[in-house]
Structures are given as C-alpha cells and as structure tokens.
Amino acid sequence: MSIVYGIQGQLLEVTVVACNKLKDTEWISRQDPYVCLEYGSSKYRTRTCTDGGKNPTFQEKFVFTLIEGLREINVVVWNSNTVNTDDFIGSGKIQLQKVLSHGYDDTAWPLQTKRGRHAGEVRLIMHYANANKPATSHVPSGSPYGAPTPGSYPYSAAPQHAVSHPPPSAYPAPSHPPPSAYPAPSPYPAVPPPSATYHPPSPYPPQPTAYPSPYSSTSAYPPPPYPPQGYSYPPGPYPGAYPPRSH
C-alpha cells in the first residue's frame, strides 16, 4: 500500500457506530459506555449510551482536520458513573492508511485493558473525499517524464516527415573516395639529405703529404732570381721604338 501525502488541512469523517463485547465493569447494574476520540489537538466524545452494557450503539459522526504525518486516531471507551469516577473499559489505535488510500474504511478495531488484555471492539466508519486525487494526495510512482508514446520523438531527433530534404539514400554514392587530408606513406625508406649524412671520425691521425708544396713560405732555400742567371733577351731590331708602319 502506497504512502499518501498531501493530506494537510483535508477533512476526514469518522462515524462511531457501536461497540461489541465490551468488558463489563458493573457487578449489579448495566454499564453506561461512551467513546472518546483524540487526533492531534482535536478531541470528541459521544453521548452516553445508558444501560448499553456490553454492546452499546451510538451512530454519531465527527469531522477531523487531517495533519500531515499523523496517521492514527486514539480511541478510549469509558463507563459513566454518577457517584464515583468513570471506569476505564479499554483503548485502541485507529490506523488511517486504508481510508486515506481508498476513501472508505468500515472496520471493528480491537480494544485492550491497561494490562494488555482484550476488552472488546469499537466499530468505526470513515470517509475521506480526496482519496481519488493522486495528483495531490499520492506519491508519484515514477519519473514525471514518462516514456515517449508512439508518434512522439525526443528533442535530439526529428521525425522523417519533418525533414525537408530527401533521406541520405536518395543521393548517388561518389564514384571515387574523397581525397585524404594526408599523403599516403611511401613504401620505400626515406633517404636523408647529404648534409645530414653522418661520418664517424677516423681513429688514425692525419698523414703528412709526401712532397712539400713549391709555394710554401717555409722552404729552407731562398727563392731563385728572375730571370735566371746566364740568360738575356735578344736585342730587337729597333731597340726602344715600335716597328715602322708598312706603306
């Protein structure tokens, strides 16, 4: 049975019908029972059923203002005395869960003495008019967003009839695959450039050249004179002048 909420300030009708097989507190005469109801700060008392004995009848209705979180009514049955104090017959607790869920409850509730022994029954009929309003009196059984019904669709996708362009299958497939954003890798290993070729250093010291350079300034011999000794230029036919022009 589901828990009912939203009962604060709602009205509950309680009718005290009768009592059955009450404990008899009188030895000679018949007892005069009456019933007291208590719910929160509300307290009601039926009339005294004179000479009601063990099975008094009342048929009295009371109206309670419900309190959120309070789900039971305390009931006490007394025997009225004119000379001495009233005699306690029995008490019990009336559970409201059924009437709040279904709107109607007709049950005989057990009574007990102060020592916990059976002291009879009290019959109550209760009515709750707002039991058929789940929006205000029942806990929602599931998520406020229900499963999508046929014909509905989520916000992230639209139905096919709402799309103006044809479906993807209506377009022809491309004859060749689109060009890739990156070039295809070469099947041959990459050759590094000449400048990047690495030559390990030789483990041997550099060898001197076999013949010294003739132009080296470190030669031990002085340079030969020019022109060489014993050589002279032949005298020209016209020393110191250009040859005559031909006529």
Image (spheres, rainbow, N blue to C red):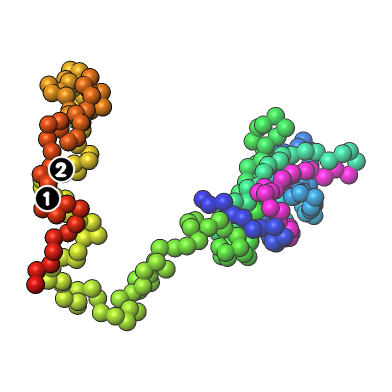
Camera-side mark, 2 or 1 = 1
Percent of width and height locating residue 5? 62, 55
- Asked whether 177 or 142 is in front, the reply is 177
Q: Which of the two labelled residues, at mark 2 and mark 1, occupies the earlier sequence position?
A: 2
Where is residue 82, by image quadrant? top right
User: Residue visible at 72% across and 45% down?
Assistant: 74
Q: Nearer the viewer, residue 230 or 47?
A: 230
In the picture provided, is 171 more to the left or to the right than 138? left
Crowd class of label 2 (few under 14; some 14 to 19; many from 20; radius 10 Å): few
In the displayed orientation, state which residue is furthest to the front. 238
The residue that label 2 is drawn on is 191
In the rendered structure, does residue 202 fall within the stretch colored magenta?
no
* Residue 236 image label: 1
Q: Which is the main secondary structure of the residues drawn in magenta?
A: strand
Which image quarter is the C terminus in? bottom left
Residue extending farthest to the bottom is 164
**Is 36 in front, or is 193?**
193
Question: Is residue 70 in the magenta section?
Answer: yes
Mark 1 closeness class: few <14, some 14–19, many ≥20 residues within 10 Å: few
Could you tell whether 163 is left or right of 190 in the image?
A: right
Q: CA distance from mark 2 to mark 1?
A: 69 Å
> In the rendered view, does 110 fall on the left or right side of 44?
left
Q: Position of residue 227 (x, y in %)?
A: 17, 36
Q: Is residue 91 visible?
A: yes
Residue depicted at 76% across the width and 49% down the height: 40
- Please give the name of the residue rendered at 36% of the width and 69% of the height, measured from the top-left corner: 157
- Compared with 223, 245 (above or below) is below
Specify the amino acid type for callout 2.
Answer: Val
Boundaries of the magenta span: 59-82
Q: Secondary structure at mark 1?
A: loop
